[in-house]
């Protein structure tokens, strides 16, 4: 009875050893190499809802949001769709303050014309990894005869350079 178990076991071991011994590494056919780069930052948008605005209306809007920087580098904040601003507002001033940093951006329009010569309508800064609180202050005056429209799109954008 022992030979009935022992013979098949020995035959199985012999076949397995022969199959494994027959394989010889002759070389590599391909090498895989890549880098994964995630978004260098997370920007949390603040919704600035001015509601319905009317001719000659003057108003302010203040909000706070945050950015989490994962990769150190140069970032810039730009105003988008300035033509929309030009067609609705006679006076428009956005001030951005990034706490824990020194960035201060002003975008000013008076009488439908971009006039802020001291500070450009974008700001570029070096940010180290970490969390930043962003204060956005908006002051505006609507033109006497603004273009009628509804607007629901981004106004400020952050780029990693």
Image (cartoon, rainbow, N blue to C red):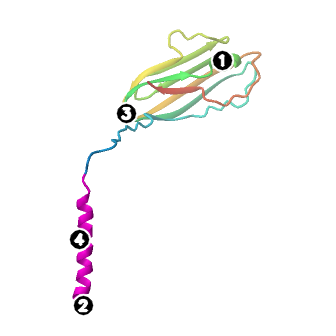
4 and 3 marks in contact (CB < 8 Å): no
- Judge depth for marks 2 and 3 and give the one in front: 2
Q: Few, some or many C-alpha atoms within 10 Å of disc 1 (few <14, some 14-19, many ≥20)?
A: few
Q: Considering only order in the chain, which callout, 3 or 2, is on the residue closer to the N terminus? A: 2
Q: Considering only order in the chain, which callout, 4 or 2, is on the residue closer to the N terminus? A: 2
Q: Mark 1 to mark 2: distance in Å? A: 95 Å
The quadrant holding residue 45 is top right
Give residue 129's mark: 3
Q: Considering only order in the chain, which callout, 3 or 4, is on the residue closer to the N terminus? A: 4
Residue 160 visible in the shown view: yes
Q: Residue at x 53, y 9 (%)?
A: 117
Q: Secondary structure at mark 1?
A: helix
1 and 4 marks in contact (CB < 8 Å): no
| In the image, residue 15 lies in the stretch drawn in magenta | yes
Give the percent coordinates (x, y) of residue 63. Answer: 56, 32
Q: Residue at x 53, y 22 (%)?
A: 78
Give residue 1's mark: 2
Residue assigned mark 4 = 14
Give the percent coordinates (x, y) of residue 51. Answer: 70, 31
- Judge depth for marks 1 and 2 and give the one in front: 2
Q: Residue at x 70, y 17 (%)?
A: 87
2 and 3 marks in contact (CB < 8 Å): no
């Amino acid at each position: 009875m022992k030979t009935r178990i022992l013979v098949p076991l020995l035959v199985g071991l012999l076949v397995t050893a022969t199959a494994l011994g027959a394989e010889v590494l002759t070389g590599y056919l391909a090498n895989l190499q890549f880098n994964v780069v995630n978004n260098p930052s997370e920007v949390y948008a603040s919704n600035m809802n001015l509601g319905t605005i009317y001719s000659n209306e003057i108003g302010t809007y203040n909000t706070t949001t945050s950015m989490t920087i994962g990769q150190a580098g140069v970032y810039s904040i730009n105003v988008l769709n300035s033509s929309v601003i030009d067609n609705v507002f006679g006076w428009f001033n956005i001030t951005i303050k990034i706490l824990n940093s020194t960035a201060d951006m002003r975008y000013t329009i008076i009488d439908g014309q971009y006039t802020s010569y001291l500070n450009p309508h974008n700001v570029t800064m070096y940010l180290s990894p970490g969390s930043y609180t962003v204060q956005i202050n908006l002051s505006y005056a609507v033109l006497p005869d603004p273009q009628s429209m509804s607007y629901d799109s981004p106004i400020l954008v952050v780029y990693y350079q």
